[in-house]
Amino acid sequence: MFADSGRLHIAIQKSGRLSQLSRELLKDAGLRIQNGKNDLVARVENFPIDLMFVRDDDIPTFVSDGVCEFGVVGRNVLEEFALGEAEPRYDVIAPLNFGRCALKLAAPRDAGYAGPASLDGKRIATSYPRLLNRYLSDRGVSAEIVKMNGAVELAPRLGIAPFVCDLVSTGATLEANGLEPVETVLESEALLVRTRKPLSPAKADLAENLMRRIDGVLATQESKYIMLNAPEAALQRISAILP
Ligand code: PRT
Ligand code: ZN
């Protein structure tokens, strides 16, 4: 739909856990984002770039199809999508240091879980059926996967499935529902992805510029500026304790 306009399109989550941090990353990269009324698109004032605000689940499709040249999306969403594809139509450019979580299998605290074999023949509720299926078949476990689009942590209490496979960050949600994490299926964080569709030379230049800017932001996040007063004699010992 946008492929032929001269502007580059970056898909970010409209509202949710990644939306604010995605915007901040782009601002830190020097993009001046217009605060317009339109809640689907925002123009970037100082580059021919538009931001598209969408559901995170749509981002892998938009980037693969080249509707958006770039996207910011969780590894969990991207890999679940990729498992349904013949071959990837995007490249992962960089992990972005936010949105960290893990897709975990969880069991009721009193279930006496004793390894993946405990799941054999059982029902497991998840929003990530392909990732879970890969995990189980890699381990020779055969279980029934029940797809739920939300509130997965309620599945045991509702009698839908005794086990769940859901995203965890602090673990508070599992705990509040009497569940404990027992296996990690996937470690995740937000990723910058780029379409494999060929770009016009002008767009390709702009894409390189954007990636360099984001790279710069990520590099400065990794360094800290420390000022301290110390006797010169202590310098060697101080540098020894700094990473
Ligand atoms: O509307 P849209 O489809 O865009 O949003 P969404 O509701 O599908 O996604 P959203 O905003 O919940 O999450 C977006 C992305 O953030 C996810 O795809 C992950 O990559 C990342 N992320 C990081 C998380 C979490 N941490 C997280 N804790 N996504 C979801 N959760 C949920 C989890 O599902 C569970 O309900 O938070 C709860 C667990 O949190 P703790 O802290 O109690 O463990
Ligand atoms: Zn979603």
Image (spheres, rainbow, N blue to C red):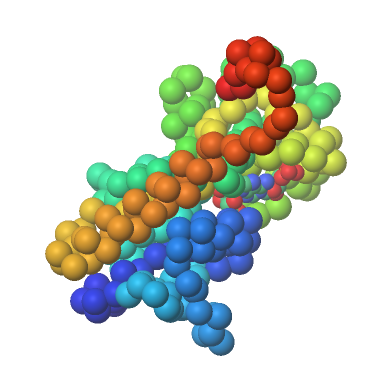
- Is residue 50 depicted above or below 143 in this figure? below
In percent of width and height, residue 9 lies at 35, 69
> What quarter of the picture does the C terminus occupy?
top right
- Is residue 71 depicted above or below 134 in this figure? below
Q: Nearer the viewer, residue 17 or 43?
A: 43
Q: Is residue 73 left or right of residue 212?
A: right
Q: Quadrant of residue 199?
A: bottom left
Q: Is residue 60 visible?
A: no
- Which residue appears at 25% of the width and 44% of the height? 87
Q: Quadrant of residue 207?
A: bottom left
In percent of width and height, residue 104 lies at 62, 33
- Which residue appears at 49% of the width and 73% of the height? 33
Q: Is residue 51 left or right of residue 93?
A: right
- Which residue appears at 46% of the width and 41% of the height? 219
- Which residue appears at 61% of the width and 66% of the height? 15
- Is residue 60 depicted above or below 118 in this figure? below
Q: Is residue 205 visible?
A: yes
In percent of width and height, residue 139 lies at 48, 19
> What quarter of the picture does the N terminus occupy?
bottom left
